Image (cartoon, helix red, strand yellow):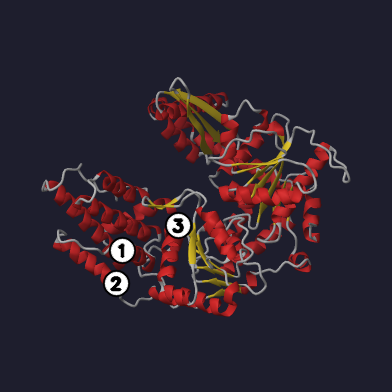
Amino acid sequence: MELRPYQKKVVEAIGEENAIVKMPTGSGKTFVAAEFVLRGLKESRKINENAQEESTSTQAALFLVPTCDLVTQQKRALKRWISDYYPFHIAEYFGGRTVPATKFDVLVSTPQAFLTLQQTEAKSKWFAWSNFFACVFDEVHHVLKDHPYRIIAHGIKAWEKEGNRVQIVGLSASLTYAVEHRAVEQALANLCHDLSVKKMISPTEKELVRSGYVPQDDNIETMKKPWDVPENVIPESKRRPHEMHGQFMQRVDTKSTTYFASKILLVVREIEADIISCINNNTCDCEPFKSPIRQIKLSTWEDYAYRMKCRARKGSAMQMMYRLCEIWYVALRMVVQSWEEEEQLVLQWLIINDGFRKEGWFSPKLESSLNGVERLCYCSSIQSEKLQSLTTNLIEKRKKKGVSFRGIVFVQQRISAYVLSQYLNNHKKCIDHGLHAGYVAARNSRITPSVKVRAGEATKCINDFRDGSINVIVATSVIEEGFDVPEANVVISFDYLKDTVELSQRFGRARQKTSSLTLMSERKDRPLSALKDVKTIQESIIIEFDPEKSKQVSLARKQSQNDRERAAFSVLNDTARCERSPLEVLNMYAAKTKATTNIDAIDSGPDKIFRCKIVYASLNRTMDGSGEGTTKKLARHQAAKNILDKLREMDKEKGM
């Protein structure tokens, strides 16, 4: 295999400097990274082009990817590129896998798994930074958020302060989640600072097209949607994910929720009332019921119902009530997560799970509320037209492309992927036209407590898609990043796009010239045109990138970080609270100082004592704390207290 001209140019431009490479999805970022790694290995081992010598250097390359499934895929790609020509050993590691037992030349890993390796295998020099000459961050934009990538970036920075060096190369199709011009500039400046970047590289569109790459941005069809969101939902500009629960409960208290949301909530309350009535009338022997819907974490609602269902006597009326309760808690969660916009998929979830089943012992109020929501399933609505448009679009594309048809439908939530795939597989017209759907979500994740994604299920779905056993995948963002599905020739974004990362990743999955790309919904404050403008802004920033200017930004950021730490010192100075609730205080301090905390590992030795290590990483400093105790909680608290003590002493020395 040979690099295309623009790929070769990018590799040569990287040289020996820390660099960020922005290239469109499908343009061969992995090949660029593989060639960069190969050249580094050859240089460090002084291998002649015509001689296959054994590796002698102790240093290796670290290749980080954000998901477990990508580890195997990228290892396979690196092996094809590297090991076919030189006898280099490429190892892989992610949670649940055996720790590499032999010396490697390249390690492909998820970031969290690598952080755990550095903790649990501290005595092995193989996983220390001194063993790596380079670190590749695939999908490097994750460094910008609270992610293990960011902890690793800060860890490298701290290690390099001692005069060491690890060359960093970051790869992505889009470098920021920001949309506004100033926010985009700031995000890229932050990214460059965190990774000590000296170069930003991106091939021009002319170079891409000249070498056979087919840009797809201009081919995206935006549906003239006959649907819209329900009236009186919270405007998009005022939505804050961390306030989602609070805003919904406030709307409940003020009776300002949508009609649909109020109907779903009414059923939930009537189910809860029937459960309480059953317990109070002593018709069952079970523990008291306490409604969980005031808890901020939405998934705890269904978790509670699932636990109570499992504790109830098998086949009892109470077990059936808790089963129904779990189903409707999930429905309410879907409503809240969608900011009360989603209706049709909620109804489909209830239909799929027999959520309208009625028993003779149900109270009249519960039965009436169930009937009220069930009637909505048969009412023609604006939102129901969205599902009809989706099925019509898929069927038309299936007719046009025949047996070669392969469609990917992107959604925001795992539950939406599951429900939509079930809907398509049960839709008569879809069945008649040969549509067979599967869904893809993160490995070992769950849809609900009763519906889990098994290990290997996503990979099997992708393989079935490639060989034609299924021809539609409904997927969340897990398939956006890096999954190689060249067979895809239809991509539909069922939900709106949040940022340019989704724009680049989603529609980059279909790389054939005749591919069909459709956007079914747009955010009013982030239309497709605005997201395309952000991509243009990124290109101009890359072209005009100046390392000296980046240094000035770095100095300003350090000063801002110092100011944040000075303002947050009062948190550290509350020693009584630090003694009482150290983990809570550490998390509060990290939030105020825009830092990250990561629990590396909690292990129990032969002495049955739990040992824990927590890493705190901010723009200015990285430190760890160790703790031990007879329980995991005590070990975590001791480790957090250890960090708080170090931070307090360090800040006192600065005169805070």
Q: Which comes sooner in the sequence, label 3 or label 2? A: 2
Left or right: residue 108 compared with residue 212:
left
Look at label 2 and name its amino acid. Answer: Leu
Q: In the rendered image, which residue does mark 2 sit on?
A: 376
* Identity of the residue drawn at 60% across and 72% down: 404
User: Is 146 situated above or below 219?
Assistant: above
Residue 210, given in percent of the width and then of the height, sits at 79, 68
Q: Residue furthest left?
A: 281
* Label 1, label 2: how far apart the Cα atoms are: 12 Å
Q: Residues within 10 Å of mark 1 (few under 14, many from 20)?
A: many
Element marked by disc 2: helix
Q: Residues within 10 Å of mark 2 (few under 14, many from 20)?
A: some
* Identity of the residue drawn at 56% across and 63% down: 465
* Identity of the residue drawn at 77% across and 54% down: 10
Q: Which mark is residue 414?
A: 3
**Who is closer to the viewer here, 90 or 434?**
434
Q: Which comes sooner in the sequence, label 1 or label 2? A: 1
* Label 3, label 1: how far apart the Cα atoms are: 20 Å
Q: In the rendered image, which residue does mark 1 sit on?
A: 261
- For the N terminus, which image quadrant? bottom right
Left or right: residue 103 compared with residue 295:
right
